[in-house]
Amino acid sequence: MAIVIPADLTIVTLSGQPQRFTEVYAASLLQLASDLWQARAEITFMRASCQSVTEQMPDGMRADVIDDAGYHFLASRYRANLGVRVLFVDRTARADLGGASRADTRVCFVKYEENPPSASRMLAHELGHLLSLPHIDDNADNGPGHESEQAARLRNLMYSGALNPDALITGAQRSTARSSALAQRFSR
C-alpha cells in the first residue's frame, strides 16, 4: 500500500538576488521526485502548499547564496508542517552542493538546475535522506576488487556524487525508507 506524505514547498528568494524557480517548476520537480519514489518504494510526496518568500539573511551570513549556516537558518524559519518542507533556492555557496536535508527537522533544500530530470533526482535524493537513508557510498570500499560494487553504487539514488538517471534503490533501502519515522507517520 502506498504511503502518502504531504510536502510544503517554499521558494526562497534572497533579498536583492535573482530567482529562477517558479511555483510551476517547483511543483513539477516534486511530482517527478514523487513518481520516482512511488515506483521504487510505493511512497508518494503530495504537494500540500506552495509559497514564494523573499528572505533577508541575518548579519554574519552570506546574503547572496545559501551556505550551511543559511540552510540551518531557513530550516528553522520555515519548519515542516505535518509532512516535509522543501526549500527551493537559486544558488548555493558551493557549486557541488545541490541540496541538503536533515531527517530530524524534515526540511530539505535543492538549488536551481535547468534540467528537470536531474533536478528532480536531486530532490528525490534529499527526500531519501528525510526517509532515513544515508549515502550509499559512506564507508564503502572502492579499492581494487570492488569495481562491481562501485558500479552498482554509482547507479543508486543515494550516491553522494552525480546522480545516475537509473536512480535505483536496493531492497534494504526500500525497507528502511518505508519503516522510517517519517513514513510511519503516514502508514495506514
Image (cartoon, rainbow, N blue to C red):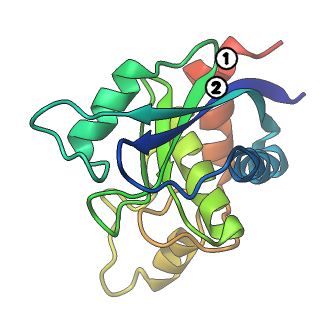
Q: Amino acid at mark 1?
A: Gln
69 left or right of 137 in image: left
Secondary structure at numbered mark 1: helix
Q: Position of residue 50 (x, y in %)?
A: 68, 30
Q: Position of residue 40 (x, y in %)?
A: 77, 50
Front residue of 28/107: it is 28
61 left or right of 142 in image: left
- Which callout, 1 or 2, points at the residue further toward the start of the chain? 2
Q: Which residue is mark 2?
A: 179
User: In the rendered view, would you say 34 is above or below 188?
Assistant: below
> Do the numbered discs 1 and 2 sit on residues whose CB atoms are within 8 Å?
yes
- Residue extending farthest right: 1
Secondary structure at numbered mark 2: helix
Position of the C terminus, as image quadrant, is top right
Q: Which residue is mark 1?
A: 184
Q: Amino acid at mark 2?
A: Ser
Give the residue at x 30% y 81%.
Answer: 143
Position of the N terminus, as image quadrant, is top right
Give the residue at x 67% y 23%.
Answer: 183
Q: Position of residue 39 (x, y in %)?
A: 84, 51
Give me the C-alpha separation between circle 1 and circle 2: 6 Å
At label 1, counting other C-alpha atoms closer than 10 Å, the crowd grade (few under 14, some 14-19, many 20 or more) is: some
66 left or right of 134 in image: left
Q: Position of residue 124 (x, y in %)?
A: 63, 50
